[in-house]
Amino acid sequence: MASEFSFDIVSQFDMQEVRNAVDQVKREITTRYDFRGVNASIELKDDLIEIVAPGEMKVQQVYDVLMQKIINRKQSPKILDAAEAKPTGGMDFKQEIKLVKVLSQEKCKQISALIKEGGFKVKPSINGTAVRVSAKDKDELQAVMGYMRGKEEVVEVVLAFENYR
């Protein structure tokens, strides 16, 4: 029997579902009445979604459709980190939306601090882009998981728990 149990807290999402959501947005842009004759586009790159449309309002409409499709595909809107729409020349505006794939060092520190504030008998440690939580009792680890699910709004990222041993 292991003397110490642990799990990792990471941030992850299903990239295929995001790809499907972007494809659905592309199709909806081509068929919607309010986008007829408008040169609007959305493109998924490695860790970035790029929206180009004439005018800030059209960019915001495409972004709203994207949010709807992301939620419909059971992905959290917290995976999207949208920047302000910027003019690119002429009447076109461009918005870049970063996909939050990993926990930053600041978020890892914040998660560690939250766990310590919770008063659990566990040891959180930062391992690159993950926070490893270890304890001698599995029940403590389960309590930390439940506690952190309730704190996702504070952390403002999607949390996933893996490598539970």
Image (cartoon, rainbow, N blue to C red):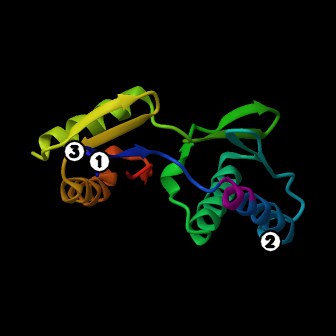
Three-letter residue code for mark 1: Ala
Which residue position is annotated with label 2?
Answer: 32
Distance from disc 1 to disc 2, alpha carbons, whole Å, reads 58 Å
Mark 2 falls on what kind of element?
loop
Three-letter residue code for mark 3: Ala
Three-letter residue code for mark 2: Arg
Q: Residue visible at 9% across and 45% down?
A: 119
Q: Earlier in the sequence, mark 2 or mark 3?
A: 2
Please tell me whether residue 91 is drawn above or below residue 5 in the rendered image. above
Disc ID at residue 145: none
Residues in magenta, as a range: 15-19
Disc ID at residue 135: 3
Q: Residue visible at 83% across and 66% down?
A: 27
Q: Earlier in the sequence, mark 1 or mark 3?
A: 1
Identify the main secondary structure in magenta: helix
Mark 3 falls on what kind of element?
strand
Please tell me whether residue 49 is drawn above or below residue 19 in the rendered image. above
Q: Position of residue 46 (x, y in %)?
A: 73, 39
Q: Is the C-beta separation of discs 1 and 2 under 8 Å?
A: no
In the displayed structure image, the side of residue 129 where residue 119 appears, left or right: left
